[in-house]
Image (cartoon, coloured by chain):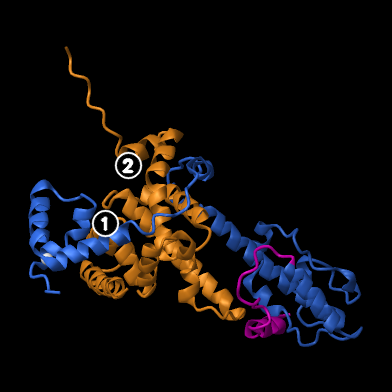
Chain colours: A orange, B blue
Amino acid sequence: MTPSPEIRPPTDTELIERWKAGDTRAATQLVGRHSQALARFAASSGEREGIEELVQDTFVRAFASLDSFRGESSLRTWLFTIERRLMLDRRRAERRSRETVPDEESDHVSEYGALDSLIAEEAQERVRRSLEALSPTQRDVFTLRVQQGLSYKEIAEILGTTEGAARVHYHNAIQTVKEFLRDE
Amino acid sequence: MNKCMELDLQEMLPDLLHRTLDSAARARVEAHVAECASCTEELKVLRTVASAAVFAPTIDVDRIVGHIAPYRPIAPVVQAPARSRVVSWLVAASMLVVIAGGGSLLMVQQRQPGARVAPTAVASHQVSTSSQSVAVKPPVTSVPVTRTLDQPIHTLALAPGVDGLSDGDLRQLMNDMDSFDALPTVEPEPVLSVDTGDNLDQGL
Ligand SMILES: [Zn+2]
C-alpha cells in the first residue's frame, strides 16, 4: 500500500502565488483565513462602526500591493500593519471633523463606544473598563499580544516601534488591567 | 502578591495561552506557573481578557473578495520620451515669439496714425508695415515650429512693453495666452530686454 500524500493546508505564500497566477479561490482562502482576526483587532482597538468596511479596505489595499509584501513578516502581521494605519487615518479624520463641529464626547469615550455592545456580560464589562483605561498604544500592544498572540517582534513591526518599547507598553498595560480586575 | 522572579517565563504567558510554545518551553512555563502565585494570577487575567472581545462582527468573505481587483504586477515607471520634451520646448519657444508678435501688433494699434512705428521687424514676417494694418491678430496656434526657429532671436527684443496697452488690449492678450498649450512657467520675456532692440532700431 502506498502511503497517502500528506494533506496540509497551503501556506499564505503559496496562496499568494496562486492568486497571482489567476486563481481567485486563493483570494477567498486568504481572506477567510485572516478576516476575523482583523475584525477582532479593530473591535479591541476601539473601532465602533464600519469594522467590515475597514477589513475590506485592508484586504483591497493589501492585494493591490502584494508585490511589496516581501514575506519577511507573516502575512497576518502585514495585514495588521495596514489595518492599523487605516484606523489611525480614520481617527485623524474623525478628530478633524470634530474640530470643526464641536462634540461633547471625548475621543477616548467615543472610541470605546464600540465595546459597549460587543462585551455584554458583566465579567467582560470589567475587562472593557480596564482596556478603556489604557492609552491607545498600550491597548494595541496589549490586545495584539493577549488576544492575537503575536510576538513582540511582530507587534513592534505593526506599530513601527522597537521590541523594547512594545515590552514596556505591555508591562504597563498588564499592571493597569490587573489592578482593575483585582479591585472589582 | 509576591513578585515573579522569573520574568522571562512570565513574559511567555500569552504564548502559553495561544499554544505557540514548543513542548520544552511549554513544560518549563507550566511548571513555573504551578508554583508562582503572581503568574497564576496573571494567566487568569490574560484568559479573561483573551476571551472578552471576541464579539467582532462576522465578516462576509465573498463580499470582500468581490472588491479585490485582479492581480497586476507593478510595472516599471516609463520615462516620457525625450523627444516629446524637446517638442514641448520648441512649442513653448514658438509661443514666446507669437506673444512678442502679438504684443508688437497691439502696440502698433495703440499708436496714433502718422506716428513712427519703431520696431517693425515683427511685421516683416506677418503683415505689411502699414500703420493701417491694425486688424491683423497675432497668429495664435498656426505658427509652424520650423518657421519660428528661423526667426532671429532679436525679434523678441523688438517687442515694446505692454505699458501702453489699454485694458481691453491687455485682456485680449491674456485671453490669447490662456489658449496656449505649452506656455513656459516664466513670464514672457520680450518686454524685458531692450538693448539689442535699440541697436537694431538704429540700423534701420
Ligand atoms: Zn512567575
| Subunit under mark 1 | A
Q: Is residue A144 visible?
A: no
Side of B122 where B146 appears, left or right: left
Mark 2: give few (<14), some (14-19) or many (20+) Cα within 10 Å: some
Q: Position of residue A76 (x, y in %)?
A: 33, 51
Q: In which quarter of the view is residue B163 placed? A: bottom right
The reply to whether the magenta stretch includes residue B146 is no
In the picture, the quarter occupied by the C terminus of chain A is bottom left
Residue B128 image offset from top left, x and y in percent: 85, 69
A26, above or below B147, in the image: above
Q: Nearer the viewer, residue B200 or B192?
A: B192
- Give the crowd class for mark 1: few <14, some 14-19, many >=20 residues within 10 Å: many
Relative vertical location of residue A133 with respect to residue B10 in this rendering, above or below: below
Q: Nearer the viewer, residue B92 or B105?
A: B92
Which three-letter amino acid code belongs to the residue tagged 1? Answer: Leu
Q: Amino acid at mark 2?
A: Asp
Seen at 41% across and 49% down, the residue is: A36
Which of the numbered marks, if any, corresponds to residue A150?
1
Residue at image mark 2: A12
Q: Residue at 8%, 67% (x, y): give it.
A: B6
Horizontal side of B58 relative to B147 (left or right) equals left
In the rendered view, would you say B114 is above or below A71?
A: below
Residue B46 in the image, given as x and y percentages of width and height:
26, 62
Pinpoint the chain carrying mark 2.
A
Is B189 contained in the magenta span?
yes
Q: Residue at x 46, y 69 (%)?
A: A112
Specify start and end residues of the magenta stretch as a single range.
B179-204
Question: Closest to the observer: B162 or A59?
Answer: A59
